[in-house]
Amino acid sequence: MDLELLDTTLADLGQPPFRAKQVWEWTARGTAGYDAMTNLPAPLREQLAERVPFSTLEVENEARSKDGTIKVLFRTVEDQRPVEAVLMRYRDGRRSLCLSSQSGCPLTCTFCATGTMKFGRNLTASEILDQALHFRRTEDVDHVVFMGMGEPMMNLDNVLAACRRLPDVGVSHRHTAISTVGWTPGIDRLAEQDMPIRLALSLHAADETLRSRIMPVNDRHPLREVLAACNRFYDRKKRMIFIEYVMLDGVNDAPEHAVQLAQVLDPKRFKVNLIPYNPTGSYDGSDRRTIEDFRATLEEHGIGATVRLTRGQDIDAACGQLAAKALAG
């Protein structure tokens, strides 16, 4: 829902300010439309339905994985830009959303399918929220990661505006994480916010030359500067930072790479998530033994590390696979 349009429309209709709060409360609880908002006068509900679309996004396609993951391809109502978001269901009851902050991504990380798309634009706060609200209309959700399409730190104003409303949808700030490839101005800005949002860094190589080859953004924001910003974030927030490290066969998965990674991380401030590579055509993924050996090497050097459980790979919904490619549901 375009919340700015809602405010101006209600004002134009001469409605009191509390009406916007009423509409939002219904929407955040997962209401399917204006008709269900029974504490609004019926004529007002009809006027809102005519003037304010209930969502800024249209569903183009939905794909369901055998593991319960759901991926939805949306189009923005304003200009038909493609956007994907994912709901991941876990056996412990968690319902986690992977949300996009941009249509496409301008940063062209070589392992990521989104980087092969033509970059569209930043999403508005309402377009970000509407991804979450789509899933909220079918079930409760309790975690959000900004790890979908785009670099959230390049659209931080709208991402933060969406974050401020996520608790109304059921997701606390402590259960919200923003992932970045290392956009240092955004990391410093996030550290200044009053919301206790988690920070995740997409790192993938501790050697500057190798990281630049995998992630061209490293030429603009070198890893040493990125890690300095992460340390400033920790000093301010005292919250552990997650390191995302995708395992690429023969590229960044040797024991010496693990040692390099351990040498640049403070074990009191960083925890590593090793990510099995999800095929996008660019690389081959490391095998399970190599990943386990890598994890063991990190542990030997005092760095906590886990191997991420891959979700939704069969519908191209796993980490690095979002590329607005429609699949059969």
Image: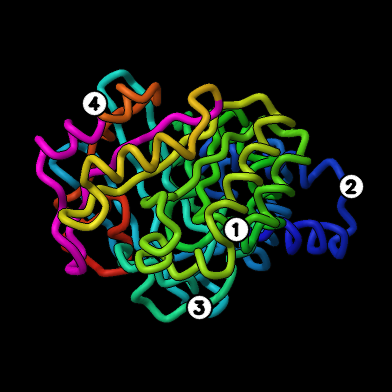
What residue does disc 4 label?
Answer: 296
Q: Is mark 3 on a helix, strand or loop?
A: loop
Which of the two residues, 327 or 3, is positioned nearer the viewer here? 327
Q: Residues within 10 Å of mark 1 (few under 14, many from 20)?
A: many
Q: Is residue 120 visible?
A: yes
Q: How crowded is mark 3: few (under 14 residues within 10 Å), some or many (20 or more)?
A: some
* Residue type, numbered disc 4: Ala
Q: Do the residues labelled 4 and 3 touch (CB within 8 Å)?
A: no
Label 2 and label 3: CA atoms lie apart by 37 Å
Q: Are marks 1 and 3 in contact (CB under 8 Å)?
A: no
Whether 286 is among the magenta residues is yes
Q: Which of marks 4 and 3 is nearer the N terminus?
A: 3
Disc on res. 183: 1
Please provide the residue range marked out in magenta: 269-296
Q: In the image as oriented, which residue stretches furthest toward the top?
A: 92
Label 1 and label 4: CA atoms lie apart by 29 Å
Q: Position of residue 48 (x, y in %)?
A: 68, 59
Question: Residue at left 48%, top 29%?
Answer: 142
What residue does disc 2 label?
Answer: 16
What residue does disc 3 label?
Answer: 120
